[in-house]
Image (cartoon, helix red, strand yellow):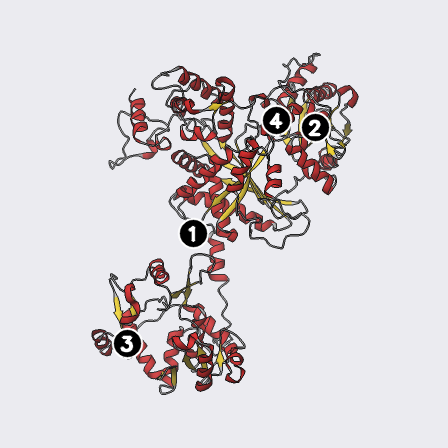
Amino acid sequence: GLAARVREHAAGQLPDYMVPATVTVLAALPLTPSGKLDKAALPAPDYAAAGAGAGRGPQSVAEEIVCGLFADILGVDSVGPDDSFFALGGHSLLAVRLASRIRVVLGVEVPVRALFEAPTPAGLAGWLGQAGPARLALGRRERPARVPLSFAQQRLWFIAQLEGTSPVYNSQVALRLEGELDAGALEAALGDVIARHEVLRTVFPAVDGEPCQQVIELGELGWALPVTAVAGDGALAEAVEHAVAGVFDLMAQVPVRARLLAVAPLVHVLVVVIHHVATDGWSTGVLARDLSVAYAARVAGQVPGWAPLPVQYADYALWQRELLGEENDPGSLLAEQVGWWRQALAGAPHELALPADRPRPAVPGHRGHTVPVTVPAQVHARLAGLAREQGVTMFMVVQAALAVLLCRLGAGEDIPVGAAVAGRADAALDDLVGFFVNTLVLRTDVSGDPDFTQLLGRVREFWLGALDHQDVPFERLVEVLAPERSLGRHPLFQVMLTVQNLAPAELNLPGLRAAGMPAGTPAARFDLDIGLSEVRDGQGQPAGLHGRLTATTDLFDEESARALGDRLARVLDAVAASPQARPRQVQMLDSGERRQIVQGWNDTAAADQAGTSAGGFDFELTAAELFVVRAGRVPDAVAVVCGGERVSYGELAARASRLAWLLAGAAYVPLDPGYPAGRLEYMLADSGAGLLVTAGGLAGGLAGGRGQVVRLDDAVVAGRLAGLPAVPPPGQAAGGQLAYVIYTSGSTGTPNGVAVAQAGVMNLAAGLRPALGAGPGVRVLQFASFSFDASVLDVVVTLTSGAVLVIATAAERAEPAALAVLAGRAGVQAASVVPSLLEVLDPAAL
């Protein structure tokens, strides 16, 4: 049809990520009464129809097979050769599963990157010609006398030996069951599940100092479901807390226990605790499904009739080591992938500088503040659209937004975060309970202030490399990279991010209504742990992102945790509305926070009851206006001394007033002609300065090509200034108006311009006048560059207090001996940059 031809034409002209996911054909565009496009009346895109195999049919056997695999993984009836995997709801987890199915069905190895670069069946089928042979298949393995632990299990085992038994790695769930419960059937069903999955009945003893897996037969285990009576709902929370308490001795105890709480004849609570050594997030769904099947069978007086599992966890642990090989073998998968990670993480920070409320303790407490994070449906929809346009996943969008937030909060421009991947790269693991999840370190480069779409490109590129090298266990990566270790922080990253795309676990027990309930406080394993889930409405449209942020109590107060969650939602809102925004442009503060920072914390005036400052300054006047008042009182007093020139207060006020008429009250950016030309050019461009005031020989190339340049030594300009009034122009500057912009040193990066208001200048003068000791007749040495913020202190304090400003020339500033001679000759009594500077500049001390 027409829609298919439009998409086909677009696919021939545009990169894959810019091809429309769907095209809707209308007989006419809906219009408003005024004749404009009525956007609200446009129909919503029908992505389901787009994924129903619309358009041309497969042109080859490879296309036909890949179309079928797409449909199977995505859970749709059919997929056309030109339908995009990601437009139909695909994400990185499903991409990994698709690569696994292709491995099994076609016998070739397809990297996840290939799917992102060729996201249609036709594109991927064309790519298959360059695919390598499928890697080692997972299947049943001959068991040696000592079955090793998986790498992930091994790390948890060693942590248990190092830190002692702890509930930190316990996973617990409490299910409220309402209805006629058959407790005997439930006990038998739990036993069936434990029998089905060997890892749930495995202990991990040490033999010659090395841990191994020892599977215990169910009959030897003596499995039973204890039942505890609870005196009503009032005592239930305490009973649940007691049921989840306790630890596992991994060397002697199987990693699962359960208890049934009898609250009322028709109300029970099932509490199940499993150590992380035997489970992960994916396993939760498998357990719920298997328990549902087993309970239904036991209630009917039968045993569950499920097919045997293709592999057990011990088979996986043996296969993992065989697949990865040895690191000292340059041809092994482990050596190849470790090499990529070495390069990818070279120079990454060992610890992020998070905005903590207190220093990090030597030993973590593993407690946290958990606060909700909510992104509304309209923002979710814009983020989903942005993800489609840029060819990225929702996780990548959130990761980029989190990097912007952390960068803006002072964490730097190199932001590593952790992300969990399912680790089930083989279809044989789909229905198996166990600890397969792996952790990737995702590094985001925020340097150069890229716009958000550019940042998404950087995130996408790192993600694709990480996914293609995800087989290296995180535990092995830590050993190989050997980062600076500390018990107080997580290695390689301290911020964990999860964007959940697994279907929620569903427990269906005949005759019972099951609902989850709080099961104790989960441990805080990271400084920050953010988990979000995408919510969809009945039509599959974005309905919001919902989740939580957990901040460790070691570093953060609950108020700070709440502020971080709110700011993340605010950043997501901002980038959804303006994808071209740069990190420095993203507003992450709410109106109250901004008002507190800009106004509240800057309200530092120290006025007495008469309305004047402790230094005798009138805060109704700006610094420039107060200088004019001083000049009017003592017009003949010396104001400035520089080289052989002396300028009185009256003469200086007249010069400044004439220039003020020409400049019309503009704010200024001081430029030191001794600075490198490149830095000066940057300051002019970054500040947006519209007028350059200079002496002809000093600006050089800076003045060239600029529209407005005032050369003070030009005869025409001098003549024009001489004809202007020697009194200030009318009008008065407000305290909140901009006085000047001055640039930081830039020693750790690009210089940043700091905007200072008139009131801030007066606060500076009032607060530091006593420290400088400035007053009528006092001589103050000024030798800092006028592009350095300390120079403002010298000038403002001196000239608003009637003191004499002694300015060192460029040659004198360059030589301490010359400064000492100047100080002695001029009778300098104060200098601001170093408190003991006068002692240093004393000629007798040189």
Residue 381, numbered circle: none
Q: Quadrant of residue 754?
A: bottom left
Helix, strand or loop status at disc 3: helix
Give how far apart the Cα atoms at labels 3 and 2 are: 85 Å
- Where residue 142 sits in the image (x, y, percent)? 67, 19
Residue, disc 3 = 658
Query: Which residue is drawn at the image coordinates 43% and 45% (left, top)?
Result: 574
Give the amino acid at mark 4: Glu
The residues bearing labels 2 and 4 have C-alpha atoms spaced at a distance of 39 Å
Kind of element beneath mark 4: helix
User: Crowdedness of circle 2 by 10 Å Cα count: few (<14), some, many (20+)?
Assistant: many
Of the two numbered discs 3 and 2 in the rendering, the one whose residue sits closer to the viewer: 3
Kind of residue at badge 3: Arg
Q: Residue at x 50, y 74 (%)?
A: 768
Q: Position of residue 475 (x, y in %)?
A: 62, 37
Do callouts 2 and 1 mark residues in contact (Cβ within 8 Å)?
A: no
User: Which is closer to the viewer, label 1 or label 3?
Assistant: 1
Residue 252 against residue 783 in the figure, above or below: above
Q: Which residue is mark 2?
A: 270
Between the residue at mark 1 and the residue at mark 3, the CA separation in whole angstroms equals 38 Å
| Residue 262 in sight from this viewpoint | no
Give coordinates of residue 619: x percent, y percent. 44, 73
**Callout 1 environment at 10 Å: few (<14), some (14 to 19), or many (20+)?**
some
Q: Which residue is mark 1?
A: 584
Q: Earlier in the sequence, mark 2 or mark 4?
A: 2
Question: Does dot 2 land on a helix, a strand or a loop?
Answer: strand
